[in-house]
Image: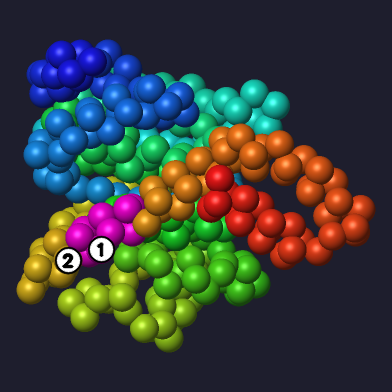
Amino acid sequence: MVKTIKQITEKLKAGDRRALARAITLVESSRRDHREQARDLITQILPLTGRSVRIGISGTPGVGKSTFIEVFGKFLTAAGHKVAVLTIDPSSKRTGGSILGDKTRMEELVRDPNAFIRPSPSGGSLGGVARRTREAMLLCEASGFDTILIETVGVGQSETTVAEMVDVFMLLLAPAGGDELQGIKRGVMELADLVVVNKADGDLKATARRAAAEYKGALGLMRPKSQHWRPEVLMISALKKLGIEDLWEAIERYRVARSTDGELEAQRREQAASWMWSELDDSLMSRFREHEAVADLLPRLETDVKSGKIDPTDAAEQLLALFLTK
């Protein structure tokens, strides 16, 4: 097994895309033996990581995330960057597989030799974020990709989870304001380092300008996450490929500003600690469900809870006591 992991590591260092795809499949596996191999692999490649720009991208449905990511990705590869795109698809409840198929929505980028796209099913994990996205990100960095784009499904808690693993969190919004602004959760706006109004072209340009002003006003009422950076609002048109260079320059300004006093590095250290606790939560729940005595009692207690024969708290305490004593 050690020899195999060393071989995979060497292939990743050489930029072998097939090895990268296989390595991500390995870390996404729920099999216990695969999880052990995955931990060994991550340990081996860890010194090769941390040198990329990690960008989280979220947005409301229909805002044009896939079009934006393809255009942004092509801009970056043309500038000499190697771009990895990790898209988090909602999972089919019947099969557990991805249902959106981002590769089919980024036909140009998927053919770019300096880009790598990996759609991953959320697997029912919290907020629709794939449980192993962090590990996939590290594997991409070990393979030489210097820019990592992580797209969320744009639903609820997924934004918070992605914001805890990236350097810069970008919120992509449509050219609307007023009632639409009220519909955007304050928590999502507070996470944003950059708010990007897409589709700012043609008849929508004036609307986009008004929306950008409203978003800027809303951000001004919120306490910034960093003492060195106040969130900016930009206008782009992914369809017309306008404003993309300005957006990248804003990201670079952000990184320079956040690097002051080691703030960005401190953020990454906090994210690593958060990852540890997330892994602990997942591992404990996994072992809890695999516990033989718990597995035997769980169906009956669940039935009793549904029928009102037992209080949910009491049932949970019984299961926890069983898990801790046997």
Q: Residue at x 31, y 71 (%)?
A: 231
Question: Residue 47: where, in percent of width, then height?
Answer: 9, 39
- Looking at the rendered image, the quarter that the N terminus falls into is top left
Report the span colored magenta.
Answer: 267-276
Residue 134 relative to residue 296: left or right: left
At label 2, the amino acid type is: Ala
At label 1, the amino acid type is: Glu
**Which of the two residues, 15 or 291, is positioned nearer the viewer here?**
291
- Looking at the rendered image, the quarter that the C terminus falls into is top right
- Magenta stretch, main secondary structure, is helix
Question: Residue 95: where, in percent of width, then height?
Answer: 64, 23
Q: In this rendering, is residue 94 above or below 7?
A: below
Q: In this rendering, is residue 245 above or below 114?
A: below
Q: Residue at x 32, y 28 (%)?
A: 36
Residue 300 relative to residue 42: left or right: right
Question: Residue 259: where, in percent of width, then height?
Answer: 11, 66
Q: Residue at x 37, y 29 (%)?
A: 35
The residue pinned by badge 2 equals: 266
Q: Is residue 248 visible?
A: yes
Element at label 2? helix
The label shown at residue 270 is: 1
Q: Is residue 269 on the magenta stretch? A: yes
**Do the numbered discs 2 and 1 sit on residues whose CB atoms are within 8 Å?**
yes
Q: Which image quarter: residue 274?
A: bottom left
**Which of the two residues, 299 or 60, is positioned nearer the viewer here?**
299
